[in-house]
Structures are given as structure tokens and as C-alpha cells.
Image: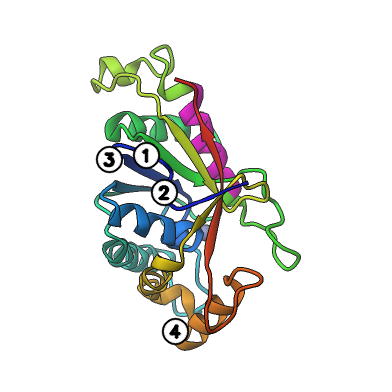
Amino acid sequence: MSVSNTEEWSSKKKILVVLAHPDDPEFFCGGTLAHWVKCGHEVHYCLITNGNKGSDDPEMTPDKLSKLREVEQRKAADVIGVGDIINLGYDDGMLIADLKIRKDVVRVIRKVKPDILVSCDPLNFFPNENYINHPDHRTAGQIALDAVFPASGNRMFFPELITDEGLGPHSVEEVWLSLTAQPNFIMDITGTFEIKLKALHEHKSQIGEPEAFDKRMRTTRRTKGSTEEDPVYEETFKRIVFRK
Ligand SMILES: [Zn+2]
């Protein structure tokens, strides 16, 4: 497996992150995104749902929560150094990989024209022994992949995006899938782990008490074999580099 934090990119890249919920980008790959921003690459987010079910608070309503999470996500993205956030606004927990959402994501890809698309692995049902992956995560990964290939790069798919909106075909160079059980690429994010934590702190409605959260993150995310005094942190990906 490749272990790298350089990617060997010789030019500045435009990167589009397509994931299900506010907070997914920072949890799944915030260290990598912060590293890319530091290197001068441009990162955009597209969030498919508004996260309006992510609360156990009996006083909370879906409407209040979606507004709150939009603000939290903007603040977290500012910590990472992300530009635009496109919110598709679908209901949390109800994602289906249908043609309507595929078209929405193709529209975003053709508008933003990213070199690199980041999403998550749709095949990962069991990230670890204590957790079933959220169905929206898997579905968002499938929606992103279905949009990338072959739809966004083929003018026969959604031709009305060309005729009505002037959005011609666009193909990405690479796809990076976070939250994968079959990684083929490791990013060392030790240098940006603190930025990842700081960004996650902006998701106040999601993380509970920040000190306990940090402690848990530092313990559970630390690479096996590294120590508390000299920790190493990594984010793993399934990286697909399309043939030119
Ligand atoms: Zn999520």
C-alpha cells in the first residue's frame, strides 16, 4: 500500500468532496483536506443531505437542526480552508441512489469541474466491530461514483444539462474514497490532525463535550504502534486514478 502525503501532483488541483452529512468531510478526511489546502489546492464541498436527524435532543426539530448544522458546517469548513459549500438539501437518513440525485451531483461536477473527487466507500457496511455504517454514507458514495462514471463525462447523459444550463461533460482525474475497508493509499495527517480536531469542534451539535471528544479522537484515531507522546495519525483511502 502507498504511504504518502505528497500525492506527486505537480499542479494545483481543484477538489470536490461529495458526502452525505454536515461533519462527514471533517470526520472522514479532514486532515487530508486541510493538508491539501495548505499545499495550495482548492477544496469545495457538496453535501447531499441537510443532516436534519442528527440529534437526540427532545427539544430539537428537524428544521432547527438543519439550519444549525449549516452554520456549523460553514464554520468547520472555514477552519479547514474550504471555499464553496453546495447543499443539495435532501432529508437526512432517507437517501436513495436514484437518477434525480445522480443528476444533481452531475450538475455540481459539471459546474465545479474538479480534478479530484472525494467521497466514501459505498461497500463499507461494517467499518469496525462496534458500528454499522450509516446507510446515507454508503448511498452517498454510490451516488458520487455513479455521477462520476460514466454520467458526468458523457454528453449523452442528462443532455438537458447542456441545452438548458450550458453544462458540458466533465471527467475527473482521480476519485478518493474515504471510510473504506479496502484502502490502497494512506495519508499521514499528523501535521494537520489538530486542524481536523479544531474543525470538528465547530460541529457543536454533534460532538458532545469537547475535552472528552478530543481524548476519544486522540486515542481511537492514533495509528497502531505510535505512542501518546509521539502520535502518528493517518487517513486511509481507496484511490482510483483514471487512465488518461
Ligand atoms: Zn455522517
* Residue type highlighted by circle 1: Trp
Q: Which quadrant, please, contains the C terminus?
A: top left
x, y percent for residue 241:
50, 31
Rendered image quadrant of residue 113? top left
Does 79 sit above or below residue 182? Answer: below
Q: Which residue is mark 1?
A: 9
Residue 210's label in the rendered image is 4
Is the residue marked by circle 4 packed among few (<14), some (14-19), or many (20+) residues within 10 Å? Answer: some
**Display colour scheme:** rainbow
**Does 128 lie within the magenta span?**
no
Marks 3 and 1 sit apart, C-alpha to C-alpha, by 7 Å
Chief secondary structure of the magenta portion? helix
**Does 149 lie within the magenta span?**
yes
* Residue type highlighted by circle 4: Pro
Q: Residue at x 38, y 13 (%)?
A: 155
x, y percent for residue 43:
31, 48
Marks 4 and 3 sit apart, C-alpha to C-alpha, by 34 Å
Rendered image quadrant of residue 221? bottom right
Q: Which residue is mark 3?
A: 12
Q: Earlier in the sequence, mark 1 or mark 4?
A: 1
Q: Nearer the observer, disc 2 or disc 4? A: 2
Disc 2 to disc 1: CB gap under 8 Å:
yes
Q: Residue at x 45, y 53 (%)?
A: 5
